[in-house]
Image (cartoon, rainbow, N blue to C red):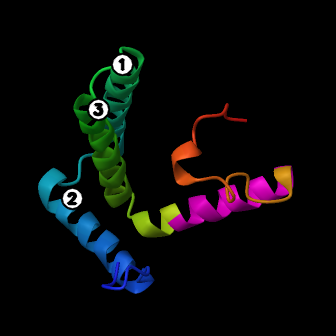
């Protein structure tokens, strides 16, 4: 973000690339199967933490593990993490427009998102 709090997309994209490079240095490049096992284990731990209503710190830690192993898998498969995020957002926008004729949450206050059932 810039000093005037507007999104600076170029800076954000560079930050994602830097993040992926740091992840390569920290996690190296396991084989995809081993990384998928680690990712699956971390997702299981996240699910357990949420179901058992652990503290926000514990849930945040588990969620960060899932994110880290997802980025690691992107590195192994030579995929651009920021491009995947953009593509996923665009896909969801298209889906919501097709299903609802608009963005479902656009008019909602950010704190209200997630309080209704997921379709």
Is residue 79 in view? Answer: no
**Residue 56, which numbered label?**
3
Ranked by sequence position, the earlier of labels 2 and 3 is 2
Q: Residue pushed farthest left?
A: 26
Residue 85's place in the image compared with 5, above or below, is above
Most foreground residue, 90 or 32: 90
The residue carrying pointer 3 sits among few (fewer than 14), some (14 to 19) or many (20 or more) residues within 10 Å by Cα, namely few
Point out the image quarter for the N terminus. Answer: bottom left
Q: Is residue 94 magenta?
A: yes
Which residue is at 41% across, 63% downward? Answer: 81
Residue matched to label 2: 23
Residue matched to label 1: 53
Q: Please provide percent x and percent y for residue 65.
A: 27, 40
Q: Is residue 110 magenta?
A: no
- The local secondary structure at tag 2 comes to helix
Q: What range is drawn magenta here?
A: 86-99
- The local secondary structure at tag 3 comes to helix
- The local secondary structure at tag 1 comes to loop
Residue 67's place in the image compared with 41, above or below, is below
- Judge from the rendering whether residue 32 lies leftward or rightward of residue 106; answer left or right: left
Real-space CA distance between mark 1 and mark 2, rounded to the nearest whole angstrom: 29 Å
């Amino acid at each position: 973000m810039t000093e005037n709090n507007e999104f600076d997309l170029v800076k954000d994209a560079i930050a994602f690339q830097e993040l992926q490079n740091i992840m390569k240095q920290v996690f190296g490049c396991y084989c995809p199967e081993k990384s998928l096992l680690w990712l699956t284990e971390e997702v299981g731990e996240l699910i357990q933490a949420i179901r058992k209503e652990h503290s926000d710190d514990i849930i945040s830690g588990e969620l960060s593990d899932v994110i880290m192993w997802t980025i690691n898998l992107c590195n192994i498969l030579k995929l651009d993490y920021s491009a995947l995020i953009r593509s996923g957002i665009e896909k969801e926008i298209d889906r919501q427009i097709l299903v609802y004729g608009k963005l479902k949450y656009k008019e909602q206050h950010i704190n209200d998102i997630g309080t209704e059932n997921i379709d």
